[in-house]
């Protein structure tokens, strides 16, 4: 029941590396598209923050993020320290999805992590703003995500960024 | 859903204080804005004080000051100081609760309770302050 695409694609701008604006709160960091060399740090950060190791999942997404430089429909961004170490501070993954059960195209954020020691330093805020910019460039006007009701930290983060409950209800069923 | 008046007033009072943590306000000043009696508001502030969300400053220019963590305290945390929002248990005696139909209805009502708690538990005082500021700016923009 999912219909994708349908809209004429416009050429995407070249890949970019965006410095977090001067004067922005938090330490100096760069936000850029993911590269193959980020894979190990992404796997390590995700494993640390979720307690689950899913190497092949991240390998596939990083490959996809590296390939999709000509389009904004799949976006995998990383925040790295703006120094010689260029160490990973966080990442965000999003995708433009279209016409799912009649929903107009929108940007879905479906993965995000920030180095625990760097929380409350606006890393997540900058990553979300950067992915929103990519979604706008792709022509969508709405951003969505899905968070478990009891997953307090991401829930408070997305709410704090102004996200409100949308017009859809998530439904599920046990498959026996 | 409707909140009890005490819960609503507690949220208004704490938002007033959390929006400017350095500021002290008297119950009279808060009550004047929200149309609450000093007596009722004083009881509410006492409960908020016991929960560590506000502190009382004595003396001239005294009043109440915010003393909690606005980025971690949610509306649910405040409301549960004044009313019980826990879902009704399945065994709770009510007409038809022992029947299959009663249990089915309980499942549906439980969904609503869960959603209510999840929503209230996801909005921090900081987030509500930001929403209030946005609504204030919108209202100001609409004024001729």
Image (spheres, coloured by chain):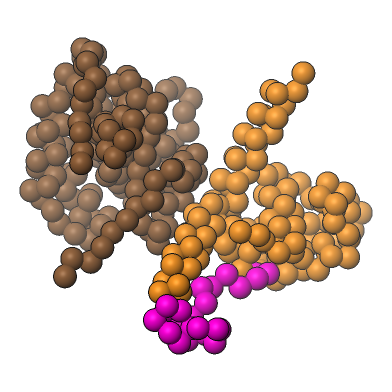
Question: In the figure, residue B105 lies in which quadrant?
Answer: bottom left
- In magenta stretch: residue B83: yes
Q: Is residue B101 visible?
A: yes
User: Percent position (x, y) of residue A121?
Assistant: 43, 41
Residue lying at the far right in this picture: please name it: B60
Question: In the figure, residue A30 lies in which quadrant?
Answer: top left
Residue range in magenta is: B81-103
Q: Residue at x 19, y 44 (%)?
A: A42
| Quadrant of the rendering where the N terminus of chain B is positioned | bottom right
User: Percent position (x, y) of residue A79?
Assistant: 29, 34
Q: Looking at the image, is B124 positioned above or below residue A27?
A: below
Q: Is residue A131 visible?
A: no
Question: In the figure, residue B67 lies in which quadrant?
Answer: bottom right
| Quadrant of the rendering where the C terminus of chain B is positioned | top right
What letter labels the chain drawn in brown?
A
User: Percent position (x, y) of residue B54?
Assistant: 71, 60
Question: Which is more toward the observer, A132 or A8?
Answer: A8
Q: Looking at the image, is B139 positioned above or below residue A57?
A: above
Q: Looking at the image, is A106 positioned above or below residue A111?
A: above
What letter labels the chain drawn in orange?
B
Q: Residue at x 56, y 45 (%)?
A: B127
Main secondary structure found in the magenta portion:
loop
Q: Residue at x 68, y 56 (%)?
A: B11
């Amino acid at each position: 029941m999912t219909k994708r695409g349908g809209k004429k694609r416009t050429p995407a701008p070249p890949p970019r590396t965006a410095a977090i604006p001067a004067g922005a709160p938090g330490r100096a960091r760069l936000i850029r598209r993911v590269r193959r060399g980020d894979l190990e740090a992404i796997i390590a950060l995700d494993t640390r923050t979720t307690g689950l190791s899913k190497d092949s999942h991240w390998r596939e997404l990083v490959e996809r993020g590296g390939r999709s430089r000509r389009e904004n429909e799949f976006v995998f961004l990383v925040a790295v320290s703006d120094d010689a170490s260029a160490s990973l501070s966080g990442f965000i993954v999003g995708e433009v999805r279209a016409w799912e059960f009649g929903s107009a195209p929108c940007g879905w954020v479906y993965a995000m992590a920030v180095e625990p020691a760097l929380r409350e330093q606006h890393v997540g805020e900058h990553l979300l703003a950067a992915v929103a910019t990519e979604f706008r460039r792709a022509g969508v006007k709405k951003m969505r995500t899905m968070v478990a009701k009891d997953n307090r930290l991401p829930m408070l983060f997305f709410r704090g960024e102004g996200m409100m409950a949308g017009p859809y209800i998530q439904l599920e069923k046990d498959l026996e | 859903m409707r909140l009890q008046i005490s819960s609503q007033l507690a949220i208004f009072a704490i938002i007033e204080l959390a929006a400017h943590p350095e500021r002290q306000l008297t119950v009279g000043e808060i009550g004047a804005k929200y149309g609450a009696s000093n007596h009722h508001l004083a009881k509410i502030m006492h409960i908020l004080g016991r929960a560590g969300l506000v502190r009382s400053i004595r003396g001239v220019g005294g009043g109440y000051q915010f003393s909690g963590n606005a980025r971690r305290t949610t509306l649910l945390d405040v409301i549960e100081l004044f009313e019980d929002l826990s879902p009704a248990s399945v065994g709770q005696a009510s007409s038809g609760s022992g029947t299959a139909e009663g249990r089915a209805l309980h499942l549906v009502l439980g969904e609503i309770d869960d959603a209510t708690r999840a929503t209230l538990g996801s909005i921090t005082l900081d987030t509500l302050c930001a929403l209030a500021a946005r609504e204030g700016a919108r209202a100001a923009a609409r004024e001729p």
